[in-house]
Every structure is written in C-alpha cells, then in structure tokens.
Image: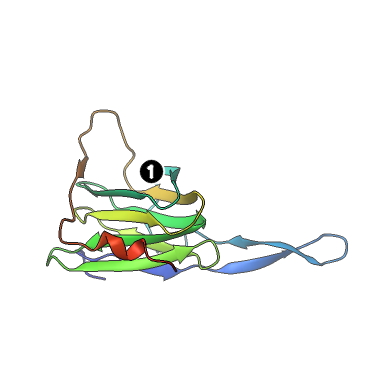
Amino acid sequence: MKSDDFDFTKLEVHETKDVKDKSVNGSLVVVWRDWDKIINEPKMVYITNVAAGKIKGPHVHKKRTSYFVCIKGKVAFVSRNSDGNYREIIASEDEPKLIQIPRNIPSAHVNLSEKESSVLVLADIAWRPNDNEMEDVLFDDYDWQKWKKPR
C-alpha cells in the first residue's frame, strides 16, 4: 500500500455456537490480533456514531493513522489522496472491513443507513486535549449528493 492512500482488509467472520445443542447463536468478527501484522498496536480504541444520512468530516489527522470498522449500519468511507483523487469504500455490519486511513490523508464517513451507524476506531496515537492533531478540511469538488440518492 502507498503511504498516501487508504486501504481495507476484509475481516474474518466466524459463526458461534450454543454450548448445549451446537446450533448457531451468532457470530464474531476478528478485528485485530497481534500476530496478523495488519496494524500497529492500538494506543486508543473508541466508537463513533454517525446519525442517519449525516457526514462526519472531512478532516485530517496530522500524526495518527486510524483504522475503522463499521459495527452497526452501513458507512461510505471517503478519502482524498495526495494527488487530489477521491476513493470510496463501503463497509457495513454485514460486510465488515478494516479501513486504514494513514496520517495526512483527509477523510469522511457518510452514514448510508436509515438509522444511526456505529464505527469502531483503533488509532496508533491516543487523542489528548488541545493537541491540535486534527484539522477540518473541505471536499468542495466532491459530489456529496450521490449518497442522498435512494440505494
């Protein structure tokens, strides 16, 4: 992966089973294991929620790389690479992906669901008050309206 691009990894989903009758009782999604070597050891983990039809961002983290997993709903991750081109990756609770946004790459999340979506975030640098590590940006030439169309 180029350092000025963002990437994703399709995540493993495993069925879980009842201890008595062995029927399927749900599933688990592997987000991070130290031996996968997908990400550096997280220094901060949190959940961000995006209201129905809303956009979070765009903004850029100047020091940290962030990893995102949509754990509820459906989200489009939009980034702008250093060459000015946009890239979009859609992830959902039904199609879990680990989205990597390197430092200095601006990005936004668009909730494509009719209800609130939740995103698990793992970061390689922990946020501290007044660290000025994040900066809001505008994607003035990006077509945000395309996400408003019926899907």
Q: Which residue is mark 1?
A: 43
Residue type (three-letter) at the residue carrying disc 1: Lys
Question: Where residue 130 appears, x then y in whole percent?
Answer: 24, 28
In percent of width and height, residue 1 lies at 26, 71
Q: Is residue 142 left or right of residue 76?
A: left
Which residue is at the front of the view, 7 or 44? Answer: 7
Query: Does residue 102 show up?
Result: yes
**Quadrant location of residue 143?**
bottom left
Q: Which residue is farthest left? A: 83
Residue 24 occupies quadrant: bottom right
- Tell whether 141 sits left or right of 79: left
Q: Toward the viewer: 19 or 150?
A: 150
Which percent across, then down, holds residue 102?
Answer: 26, 57
- Tell me: residue 88, above or below residue 113: below
Q: Who's the residue at 44% across and 46% down the image?
A: 51
- Tell me, yes or no, if residue 7 can be seen here: no
Furthest residue to the right? 20
Q: Is residue 27 toward the left or the right of residue 115 in the image?
A: right
Q: Residue at x 19, y 47 (%)?
A: 62
Left or right: where does residue 8 sit relative to residue 3? right
Q: Which residue sits at x=30%, y=32%?
A: 128
Identify the residue at image location x=35%, y=63%: 147
Kindly state the secondary structure of the residue where label 1 is placed. Answer: loop
Query: Is the residue marked by circle 1 packed among few (<14), some (14-19), or many (20+) residues within 10 Å?
Result: few
Q: Quadrant of residue 4 in the image?
A: bottom left
Residue 47 percent location from the top left of the image: 46, 44
